[in-house]
Structure formats: C-alpha cells, structure tokens
C-alpha cells in the first residue's frame, strides 16, 4: 500500500511539473466571449508582478495584439469577486498605468437586467471598485482611476437569457491620456 501511495505522489509531482512548464497555444483558455488572460495573444508574457514591468511599457494601447487590448472583465451572477482568469489582465493594465502616470482609466461597472435599478447600480459600483483595489495594489494611484456604475442601463447583449446576461455582467476599462 505504501508503494502505491509513493508512486501516486511521484506521478502527481511529475504531472504538475510538466503542466507548469507547458506553454499555452495562442487562444488557449479563452472563453466563449473571446476573453482570456494575458499572454494568449502570442506575446510570451512570463511571470507576474515585477517580472512583467519591463515589457509592459512597450505595449501599445492601440495594438489589437497587445495584452492591453483585453479591456473587459466579466463577473458571475450577483458577484463582485474577480475571477482568477482575469487577474493577469488586471495586473497588466495596472503595470501599464504605473509606468504611465499621466494616463487615466475609467472603470465602468455593469450588470445584467435582473434585480432592481438601485441594486444593480450598487453592484456595478462594487465590481468597478473590485478592479480598482487590485490595480492600486500594483501601484496605480487613486488619481489615475475613476469608477462609475451604469448598472443594467448599458447592455452589450440585448437577449434575456444566460448568454446575454453573462456578457452584460462586466467592468469595462476605458483609457484617456493626460489629465
């Protein structure tokens, strides 16, 4: 029995090691909405935190192949918690803002149509503030960030089903240069 447990531990370690070393293909891990995490656009973003800092300032906001082109963060129903798959995207934008102190970002919070208008305005604000807090942890100043909530007022998908609702539960990142 001990030999089987030892073999299982060794096998698990080998699988985890090989999984950590693999490089995702372009587009790997993207959801149905086409939004994925950093590095999926073909640019090899390696590491996190300070390791990202050197290359972020070379990315262009206008380049559709740049990780900065990913500007929508989606949320689960009735939640303001950031999904793990969007943390790298938020971090990349935060590093860019930290490297460009004259750049401002508006974080627009949105919800689906379910719930009262007042509740949805508050939920959209909580979502925008969740993104803001993570960005501030990476050195983005309060002066660079503005949050606004539109609640259910500006849907991107007109349907009344889970597909439409999932696309409407979001925070959009809108850049403006020089205050």
Image (spheres, rainbow, N blue to C red):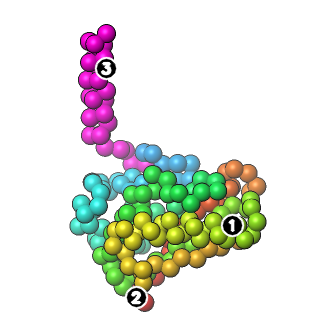
Point out the image quarter for the N terminus. Answer: top left
Q: Is residue 61 left or right of residue 7?
A: right
| Residue visible at 36% across and 64% down in the picture | 92
Would you say residue 46 sits in the magenta stretch?
no
Q: Secondary structure at mark 3?
A: helix
Q: Position of residue 35 (x, y in %)?
A: 50, 55
Numbered-mark total: 3
Residue bearing mark 3: 8
Q: Which residues are magenta?
A: 1-27
* Front disc: 3 or 2: 3
Residue bearing mark 1: 120
Circle 2 packing at 10 Å, graded few (<14), some (14-19), many (20+), is: few
Taking the image as drawn, is residue 68 in sight? no
Q: On screen, 18 above or below 61?
A: above
Q: Which mark is residue 178?
A: 2
| Residue visible at 37% across and 44% down in the picture | 25
Instruction: Tell me the CA gap for discs 1 and 2.
Output: 31 Å
Instruction: Tell me the CA gap for discs 3 and 1.
Output: 48 Å
Point out the image quarter for the C terminus. Answer: bottom left
Q: Secondary structure at mark 2?
A: loop
Among numbered discs 1 and 2, the one appearing first in the sequence: 1
Q: Main secondary structure of the magenta part?
A: helix
* Front disc: 1 or 2: 1
Judged from this view, the residue extending furthest toward the front is 2
Among numbered discs 3 and 2, the one appearing first in the sequence: 3
Q: Secondary structure at mark 1?
A: helix
Q: Is residue 96 left or right of residue 174?
A: left
- Whether the residues at callouts 3 and 1 have beta carbons within 8 Å, the answer is no
């Amino acid at each position: 029995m001990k030999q089987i447990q030892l073999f299982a531990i060794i096998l698990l370690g080998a699988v985890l090691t090989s999984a950590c070393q693999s490089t995702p293909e372009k587009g790997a891990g993207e959801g149905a909405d086409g939004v994925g995490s950093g590095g999926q656009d073909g640019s090899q973003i390696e590491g996190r935190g300070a390791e990202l800092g050197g290359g972020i300032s070379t990315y262009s906001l206008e380049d559709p192949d740049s990780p900065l082109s990913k500007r929508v963060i989606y949320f689960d129903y009735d939640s303001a918690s950031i999904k793990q798959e969007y943390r790298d995207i938020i971090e990349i934008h935060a590093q860019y803002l930290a490297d460009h102190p004259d750049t401002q970002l508006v974080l627009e919070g949105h919800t689906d149509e379910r719930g009262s208008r007042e509740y949805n305005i508050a939920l959209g604000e909580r979502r925008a503030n969740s993104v803001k807090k993570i960005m501030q942890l990476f050195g983005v100043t309060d002066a660079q960030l503005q949050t606004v909530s539109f609640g259910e007022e500006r849907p991107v998908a007109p349907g009344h089903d889970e597909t439409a609702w999932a696309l409407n539960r979001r925070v959009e990142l809108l850049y403006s240069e020089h205050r």
